[in-house]
Amino acid sequence: MGLYKETTDIITSWLQNHGTINEVTLGDVREVDLSTHTNFPLVHVIILNNDYDNGYSTYNYQYLFLDTFHDSDNTKLEILDEMNEVVTDFISALNNGTMLNSAIRISSVATGEVMYNQLQNKLYGWSLEFGVDVPNGVDPSSGVIVCG
């Protein structure tokens, strides 16, 4: 398996196993009809681009941590707070080596932006962007060199 796919799979698997998140989707946000999903809260992973440097590849992603607002049971601030807790857990797992091996790191400060009333079904949450530096030829989960 390639480093890019394995890194992406490890990250999405961690999100799928987080107790708060019910679903993880991947791809262009226009290809997913978020208005029909009822399995909220969810995370949608958007692959942005890659940067290639001497010895490292940087995989750049955008993550949408979203939940739907219902007048009867949640306030917008509670949704933002709950999704912020997931984002904080996620960044912590990336930074402390519990998700990926210690050779893999976030390439820059992760930037989060509040999302209000997005798309067709009043989605609230956070948009998070950052890159992950992966040493070329190193297994993302174990840190073992897999090629010359």
Image (spheres, rainbow, N blue to C red):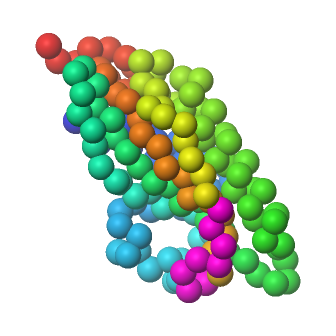
Q: With 95 as the anchor, is 141 left or right in this view?
A: left
Residue 74 position in % (x across, y down)? 82, 73
- Residue visible at 61% across and 58% down? 113
Q: Is residue 111 magenta?
A: no
- Residue visible at 34% across and 28% down? 134
The range drawn in magenta is 114-121
Residue 78 position in % (x across, y down)? 82, 64
Looking at the rendering, which quadrant does residue 66 occupy?
bottom right
- Residue visible at 56% across and 47% down? 111
Q: With 9 as the anchor, is 1 left or right in this view?
A: left
Above or below, comparing residue 57 to residue 9 in the picture: above
Which residue occupies the foreground of this view, 111 or 43?
111
Which residue occupies the foreground of this view, 22 or 86?
86
Above or below, comparing residue 8 to residue 52 in the picture: below
Residue 125 position in % (x across, y down)? 65, 64
The N terminus - image quarter = top left
Above or below, comparing residue 37 to residue 57 in the picture: below
The C terminus - image quarter = top left
Q: Does residue 111 appear anywhere in the picture?
A: yes
Characterize the magenta stretch by its predominant secondary structure. Answer: strand
Q: With 122 as the anchor, is 74 left or right in this view?
A: right
Q: Does residue 38 appear anywhere in the picture?
A: no
Above or below, comparing residue 145 to residue 34 in the picture: above
What is the total number of numbered labels drawn onto the structure image? Answer: 0
